[in-house]
Amino acid sequence: MEKQIGIGIIGLGSVSRAHIGAIALLPQARLCAICDIDPAAMDVIKDAAVKRYTDYHSLLADPDVELVHILTPHYLHARMAIDALEAGKHVILEKPMASELNDAKRLIEAADRAKTTLSVIFQNRYNPSTRELKRLIDSGACGKLLGSRAVITWCRSKEYYKSGSWRGRWETEGGGALINQSIHTLDLLSYLGGPISRVKGHISTDLLSDAIEVEDNVHAVFEYASGARGVIFASTNYVNDAPIMLEMVFENATYQLWADKLFRLIDGIPDLVLREEGGQTVDGKAYWGTGHKAEIAAVYQAVLEGKQFEIDARSAYPALDLVKGIYESSLTGAWHRLATP
């Protein structure tokens, strides 16, 4: 039988469903321990053989646990990931890698010291539509990037924010529509387009100003190091979770990503290039896409082969830097320059 990795999960909130579903489908993994401060949250796992902890330090001390999925509120991500690395565990960390840049830099340093693998969940890089666009870009067929735009219009109600005391607060969530709902798309902007050098943007709290501290609307303009220009619009005030649109304009072609579909614009009319067929959302929300299973499987394979994973702390940092740059620019009214740690 193929070697199995002993898996632990810290945090059994809503996103854990996608991870639990992926683990159940992957033969390289064996779930052996879970942890949540709320014992009732762990009832989602019915297997009596899976050990249960309410203190994550106890899970990290468990010798059966080789790799930890950290799925807790944002403000706990960096601290728990650093503790896990220092305990000799491999780590799969949900986005964002941290809620503050200084914590993200500390995590990068800890990952550099560790002999284990740290990976950050940006599952949209594993959508077949994204991978096909990346292939086309890397082939050189598209030519020079001229610009990009991203439109994220989702729905987050007062009831959503009441579902967790950490939600909607700067101290614990680190932001709103940008750092939670939009960061995957911001990651794709730099993953596909190259380094972003500066950004100027504005955030506001509009529809939910009586319920949350953080933003529910965002607009921003940014520049790539290459000279290309991009714009971002994000809102959680829409009536439903509409498919995200990401457009990239090149010298030789214009492409649009709409969730699991890739289109090429011909005379301004979208022509379908690729549509994912039969993908599994592994018990997650449909608009998360199907990339969780693919990314988690790739992490497990990297661990089994003793390799580092492509979406490590440094690879995940630019998306958080862009988020925080927009927040800073909104405060100052000035352009904010981004930097590589």
Image (cartoon, grey):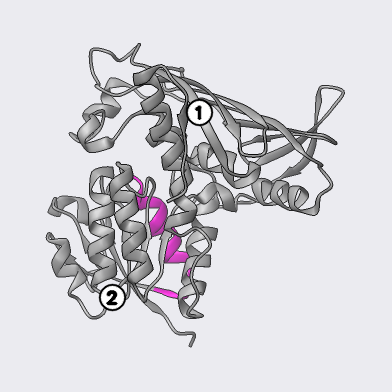
Question: Which residue does the image show at 47% across and 48% down from the upper left?
Answer: 340
* Foreground tag (2 vs 1): 1
Q: For the residue labelled by badge 2, is the local secondary structure a helix, a strand or a loop?
A: loop
Say which amino acid is labelled 2. Gly
Q: Could you tell me residue 335's position as x and y percent?
A: 47, 24
Q: Earlier in the sequence, mark 2 or mark 1?
A: 2
Residue 1 in the image: above or below residue 211: below
Residue 17 in the image: above or below residue 238: below
Question: Which residue does the image show at 48% across and 49% down from the upper left?
Answer: 122
Q: For the residue labelled by badge 1, is the local secondary structure a helix, a strand or a loop?
A: strand
Residue 193 in sight from this viewpoint? yes
Out of 309 and 245, give the one closest to the viewer: 309
Asked whether residue 17 is drawn in magenta, I would say: yes
Question: Which residue does the image show at 36% across and 65% down from the upper left?
Answer: 111
Q: Could you tell me residue 283's position as x and y percent?
A: 43, 50
Out of 127 and 247, give the one closest to the viewer: 247
- Marks 2 and 1, Cα distance to the nearest angstrom? 38 Å
Per the rendered image, the range of residues in magenta is 14-29
Residue topped by disc 2: 88
Q: Are there few (<14), some (14-19), or many (20+) residues within 10 Å of tag 2? A: some
On the image, which quarter does residue 110 sit in? bottom left
Residue 179 in the image: above or below residue 124: above
Residue topped by disc 1: 199
Question: Which residue does the image show at 39% across and 20% down from the upper left?
Answer: 330
Q: Could you tell me residue 13's position as x and y percent?
A: 28, 47
Asked whether residue 35 is drawn in magenta, I would say: no
